[in-house]
Amino acid sequence: MNPSDYLATVDPPLVAILRGLTPEEAPAVGRVLIDAGFRLLEVPLNRPGALACIRLLADMAPPEVWVGGGTMLTVHDVADVRHAGGRLMVSPNCDPEVISHARATGMLCAPGVATPTEAFLALRYGAHALKLFPAEAVGIAGLKAMKSVLPAGTPLWPVGGVTAPSLGSWVDAGATGFGIGSQLFKPGMSLKDVAASAHAFVTAWRKRAAA
């Protein structure tokens, strides 16, 4: 399945941001998240062992679950993550070279943007979804304003500070998905706590989608 078709069908469109995940815990954490309903798993590259985690998660993931890297800042990052089996490119910034290279390799591209200028640039170079980051700084009002000028149907994923209780307010403003980091996973969290957080976010999404 190509990234555009996958993006149109993935449910829920929630990206688990697993910063600080270790290879030793990756299989168990991945299983908990997949069982809870997560279909997008991201391991940021700015922590040791990230590529090994991506490889382990990609090997265990069923076809409907796409794994990839976060904090992907260079074309070398793209090559490394793709070689590890990753199909998702997430970055905190908008770098046209990285976006176009990731798209050319068949990855689902979600670069970070915080302004309309960055958003339109990212779309021009092939972004499939826009990571609104940092969402706390842009705010719900900023999301509404950006949505009003972007092409209809542009996927917008707030990242940063989103909680399960606040998810519905972001959806009302135009969010179509989310990246969830420390509210979902932190190094040292028990599998029980990860599972509870994962279920809370999936439940919040399903409740809002059914409204």
Image (cartoon, rainbow, N blue to C red):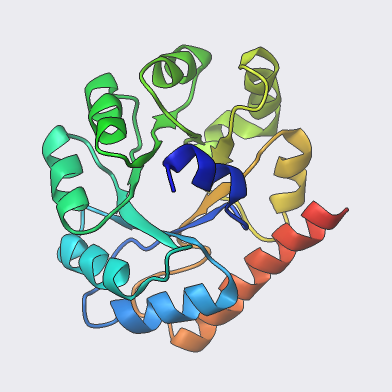
Report if residue 69 is visible in the image: yes
Report if residue 136 is visible in the image: no
- In this rendering, the answer to whether 133 lies above or below 20 is above
Total labels: the figure holds 0
Find the residue positioned furthest to the right.
211
Report which quarter residue 75 is drawn in.
Answer: top left
Q: Is residue 90 left or right of residue 191?
A: left
Q: Could you tell me residue 95's position as x and y percent?
A: 28, 24
The residue under the point 58% across, 34% down is: 156
Q: Could you tell me residue 49's position as x and y percent?
A: 16, 66
Report which quarter residue 52 is drawn in.
Answer: bottom left
The residue under the point 30% across, 76% down is: 26
Q: Is residue 22 left or right of residue 167?
A: left
Q: Could you tell me residue 77's position as x and y percent?
A: 16, 43
The residue under the point 60% across, 27% down is: 154
The residue under the point 33% across, 42% down is: 107
Between 199 and 35, the one lying in front of the other is: 35
Between 23 and 19, the one lying in front of the other is: 23
Find the residue positioned furthest to the front.
1
- In this rendering, the answer to whether 121 lies above or below 163 is above
Q: Could you tell me residue 79's position as x and y percent?
A: 14, 43
- In this rendering, the answer to whether 80 lies above or below 150 is below
- In this rendering, the answer to whether 129 lies above or below 124 is below
Q: Is residue 38 left or right of residue 73?
A: right
